[in-house]
Image: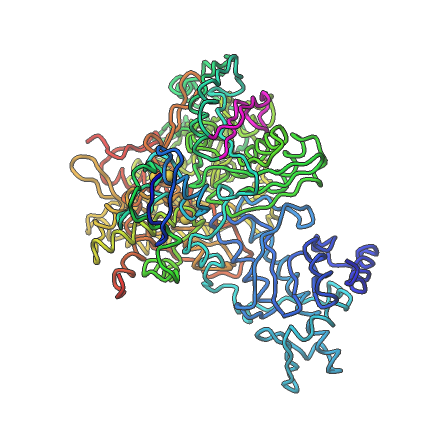
């Protein structure tokens, strides 16, 4: 059995240690904000924070989350008012929305490591997150807006 | 149920006598009928799109599927506007699949263009009933009343009453005669034409939306299917020993075999059912299946490419003719010809297909991300052999659709498995399933020849288009482009060339062919506009100026006069003419935005294309930078769209941005087959546009227009690839005669 913190709550797990975190989140914990898009760490839809770092949950076995702090989109901010979430809404970023949990988690991690990223740094950090709706220009704009706001 | 009876009786009587509204509103919605039972007489539901509840909440039902185009928001804007409702007191519901709504097939960029007037009428009907109810109470004339901010106001006296306080009376009134219902005048619009934020925004940013992949019900099994690698082959042997050893795997089931034509039926294969997704995925991977062979096993993309190109170079079957192109070509001062090839593509919506089914003896309940809920009812009914009206289809949000989710084979799979398993089943398509077992955007080859006179004018144009047709998915006989596909940017060629001959050629299909965002417009616009640019260079004329010259004077094109079959996207040509004036206007604007005239001075490399599709006009200018190693990037794209009347300019802008980037993906992606099986599997070998490939900056201009609404979701896609190809030529002198465009050009 392993224990870990999920969105600030202690949890334990005793199933298949090889099961990727993504499926624990979606099927067992009922946190479906974290999405499946490729299962191969190619698209970023499943991005969560592990001890604050953006991580693809589709390739992260449960064994690797022992004693870790996991944050999903549902736990990013109690009031859903993280600067990234605010900037996403204000710039009307989402189209279908499917990729956006992953985009926001990636962007939030980027900003906490680098509060004022350049265009190139944004591209570099976000290059693993596919959006088939093509919201990239607005993602960039929103990240800059969030970077400009205080909390970031 | 009958507490609503006075109104309901009146309503049904009107329907019976034919005096009711002709809005396809033939029945009270089930949901509102049920709600009415709980809320006594206080519930106003004049049609299937609107209900006003006892507390005055306006419930608006969106009957089209939401896949990112923001139709839920648009429909809410349209109806809330007629009621002048307070946005905070409006909720938007998603309709189940039901004929009572009329057409629900969310493709063809027609949700707004086919529903704007109809929904304005629906909203105005509810508004009139509320005004009549208030007027009755005040003993005044309803004509002297107006809806203002969720209240009815009697203009002469200034008296006002909240919707909540008159719903009960309004619900007892008979439906007004259609002639009495007057939608608002344009200048009075409050929400339509404004950049209103998406109604789903809060849920999306908090990760609490529900897509088909997210659905779950009690006692549900998760299914992953190993489908035949080659279309219509079947398992010859199945070894599931390892699969059954995997913890969580509950059942292994062999799906029924599929046969031609494909339709929307399941593809067959072997399904692994488990109590979680991961076990089902592992179980499917662990299956050892040997597959039968059929004629499709010989399908190879390389060989097909040769065949298609040869067919395109030969004479085709003439589908439109003006003058004598062959004779004019012989007499021409100069001739130019080129062949364009574009590969298969997968729509690859970010959410792979998924469906949950719960089945009893003779009913089925489905939750799925479908673009086409009524077709979903039909195919599920067919698979289960029950009547379609016994199938309830709940439409979840769609994580993108792009045409893939208009073909609900995934829902039929779930229904069949749920019946066999005796438990609810959610079918999850892995990304690999999506890439390898799709309904593909077809592969195509086109050959164009043109003749120029001594002044450089194009006097002859001969264009042959060859591709496996979408019709082959529905008929085993179909082996040449259908008129439905030819109408998409081919037969409606707008160029003013005296001798024009358009032809088509035969091609066999070996995979399921389906539609993808803007469909045949993608490859037709690519070939036509890349070739137009080639002609400009051949004539020694500026590309934009030459394109203007090819389009010719502002005029309405009458294809019927040339004997061409054209359905104008299903809308009347009188309302939506092929108007070259509008095409020239978007071209002018987009090039002005790009500072086209000064590009050479500024050493910027631009390419342009302008294309009419889905009754809208889009011109795109792409700017390209190429470094010394051949890597290219797009610093800027400039897009001008004329979509007639628009409901939400910010969302139209978003569709232009996204449609352009989707067009970019179409230019760099490739699906191919080897021995009948698709070679690509996931995003490492199926290239789609990522943030670093996308234009760094996209400027969009929306033409201010009172014209009837055109399509928006698809028209921005087709001009992108040719504008990009032309910009690459401007930068490098390399012509893109073949897609995909490599991310690194050979220099
Ligand atoms: S699902 Fe994990 S990166 Fe795509
Ligand atoms: S918003 Fe649809 S995939 Fe990104």
Give the residue displayed 72% in from the left and 74% down from the top: B133
Quadrant location of the C terminus of chain A?
Answer: bottom left
Residue B274 forms part of the magenta stretch: yes
In which quarter of the view is residue A80 placed?
bottom left
Q: Nearer the viewer, residue A37 or B661?
A: A37
Residue B55 is situated, as x and y percent measured from the top left of the image, at 63, 70
Q: Is residue B196 above or below residue B325?
A: below
- Spot the residue most to the left: B628
Q: Position of residue B198 (x, y in %)?
A: 47, 58
Q: Is residue B667 left or right of residue B41?
A: left
**Front one among B253 and A102:** B253
What x and y, as percent, mark residue A128? 29, 42
Which residue does the image show at 58% across and 56% down from the upper left?
A: B93
Q: Is residue B654 magenta?
A: no
- Relative side of B636 to B187, left or right: left
The dominant secondary structure in magenta is loop
Q: Residue furthest bottom?
A: B157
Q: At which x and y percent is residue A21?
A: 36, 40
Q: How is the image coloured?
A: rainbow
Q: Relative to A120, is B224 above or below?
A: above
Residue at the front extreme of this rendering: A1
Classify the position of the N terminus of chain A by image quarter: top left
Q: Is residue B722 visible?
A: no
Task: Please provide the residue range marked out in magenta.
Answer: B248-275
Image quarter for ligand 1: top left
- Count up the numbered dots: 0
Residue B679 in sight from this viewpoint: yes
- B386 w.r.t. B555: above or below: above
**Residue B431 appears left or right of B684:** right
Nearest the eye: B737 or B662: B662
């Amino acid at each position: 059995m392993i224990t870990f913190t999920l969105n600030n709550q202690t949890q334990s797990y005793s199933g298949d240690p090889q099961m990727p975190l993504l499926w624990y989140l979606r099927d067992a914990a009922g946190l479906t904000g974290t999405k499946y898009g490729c299962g191969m760490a190619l698209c970023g839809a499943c991005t969560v924070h592990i001890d604050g770092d953006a991580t693809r949950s589709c390739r992260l076995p449960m064994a690797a989350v022992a004693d870790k702090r996991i944050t999903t989109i549902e736990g990013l901010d109690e009031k859903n008012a993280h600067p990234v979430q605010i900037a996403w809404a204000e710039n009307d970023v989402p189209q279908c929305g499917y990729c956006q949990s992953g985009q926001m988690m990636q962007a939030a991690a980027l900003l906490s490591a680098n509060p004022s990223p350049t265009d190139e740094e944004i591209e570099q950090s976000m290059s693993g997150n596919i959006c088939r709706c093509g919201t990239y220009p607005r993602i960039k704009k929103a990240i800059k807006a969030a970077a400009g706001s205080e909390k970031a | 149920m009958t507490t609503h009876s006075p109104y309901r009786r009146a309503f049904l009587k009107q329907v019976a006598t034919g005096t009711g509204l002709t809005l396809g509103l033939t029945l009270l919605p089930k949901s509102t009928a049920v709600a009415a039972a709980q809320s006594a007489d206080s519930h106003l539901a004049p049609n299937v799109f609107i209900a006003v509840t006892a507390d005055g909440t306006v419930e608006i039902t969106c009957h089209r599927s939401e896949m990112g185009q923001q139709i839920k928001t648009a429909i809410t804007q349209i109806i809330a506007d007629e009621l002048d409702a307070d946005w905070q007191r409006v909720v938007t519901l998603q309709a189940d699949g039901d004929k009572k709504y009329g057409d629900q097939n969310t493709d063809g960029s027609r949700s707004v263009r086919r529903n704007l007037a109809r929904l304005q009428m629906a909203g105005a009907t509810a508004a009139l009933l509320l005004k009549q109810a208030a007027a009755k109470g005040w003993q005044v004339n309803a004509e002297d009343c107006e809806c203002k901010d969720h209240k009815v106001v009697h203009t002469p006296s200034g008296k006002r009453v909240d919707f909540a306080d008159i719903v009960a009376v309004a619900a007892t009134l008979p439906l007004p005669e259609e002639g009495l219902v007057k939608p608002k005048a344009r200048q009075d619009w409050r929400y339509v034409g404004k950049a209103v934020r998406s109604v789903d925004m809060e849920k999306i940013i908090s990760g609490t939306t529900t897509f088909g992949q997210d659905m779950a019900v009690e006692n549900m099994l998760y299914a992953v299917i190993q489908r035949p690698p080659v279309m219509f082959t079947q398992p010859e042997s199945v070894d599931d020993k390892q699969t059954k050893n995997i913890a969580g795997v509950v059942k292994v089931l062999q799906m029924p075999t599929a046969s031609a034509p494909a339709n929307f039926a399941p593809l067959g294969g072997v399904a692994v059912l488990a109590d979680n997704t991961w076990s089902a995925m592992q179980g499917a991977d662990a299956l050892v299946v040997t597959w039968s062979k059929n004629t499709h096993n010989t399908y190879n993309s390389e060989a097909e490419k040769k065949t298609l190109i040869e067919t395109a170079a030969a004479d085709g079957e003439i589908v439109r003719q003006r003058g004598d192109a062959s004779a004019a070509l012989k007499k021409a001062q100069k001739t130019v010809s080129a062949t364009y090839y574009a590969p298969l593509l997968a729509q690859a919506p970010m959410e792979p297909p998924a469906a949950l089914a719960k089945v009893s003896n003779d009913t089925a309940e489905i939750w799925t991300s479908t673009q086409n809920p009524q077709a979903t009812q039909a195919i599920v009914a067919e698979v289960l052999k029950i009547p379609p009206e016994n199938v309830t289809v709940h439409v979840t949000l769609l994580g993108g659709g792009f045409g893939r989710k208009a073909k609900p084979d995934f829902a039929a799979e779930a229904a069949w498995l749920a019946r066999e398993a005796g438990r609810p089943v959610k079918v999850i398509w892995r990304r690999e399933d999506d890439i390898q077992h799709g309904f593909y955007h077809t592969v195509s080859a086109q050959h164009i020849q043109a003749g120029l006179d001594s002044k450089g004018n194009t006097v002859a144009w001969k264009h042959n288009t060859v591709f496996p047709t979408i019709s082959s998915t529905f008929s085993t006989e179909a082996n040449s482009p259908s008129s439905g596909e030819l109408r998409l940017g081919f037969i409606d060629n707008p160029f003013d060339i005296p001798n024009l001959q358009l032809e088509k050629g035969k091609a066999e299909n070996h995979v399921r062919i389906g539609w993808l965002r803007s469909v045949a417009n993608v490859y037709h616009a690519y070939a036509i506009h890349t070739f137009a640019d080639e002609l400009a260079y051949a004539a020694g004329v500026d590309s934009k100026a030459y394109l203007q010259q090819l389009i010719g004077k502002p005029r309405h094109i009458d294809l019927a006069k040339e004997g061409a079959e054209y359905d104008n996207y299903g809308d009347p040509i009188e309302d939506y003419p092929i108007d070259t004036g509008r095409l020239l206007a978007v071209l002018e604007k987009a090039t002005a935005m790009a500072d086209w005239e000064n590009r050479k001075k500024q050493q910027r490399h631009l390419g342009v294309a302008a294309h009419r599709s889905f009754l809208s006009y889009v011109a795109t200018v792409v700017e390209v930078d190429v470094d010394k190693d051949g890597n290219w990037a797009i610093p800027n794209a400039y897009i001008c769209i004329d979509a007639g009347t628009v409901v939400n300019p910010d969302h139209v802008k978003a569709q232009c941005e996204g449609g352009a980037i989707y067009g970019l993906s179409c230019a760099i992606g490739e699906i191919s087959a080897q021995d009948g099986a698709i070679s690509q599997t996931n995003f490492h070998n199926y290239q789609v546009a990522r943030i670093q490939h996308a234009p760094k900056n996209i400027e969009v201009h929306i033409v201010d227009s009172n014209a009837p609404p055109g399509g928006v979701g698809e028209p921005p896609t087709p001009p992108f690839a040719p504008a990009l190809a032309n910009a690459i030529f401007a930068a490098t002198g390399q012509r893109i005669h073949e897609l995909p465009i490599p991310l690194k050009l050979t220099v």
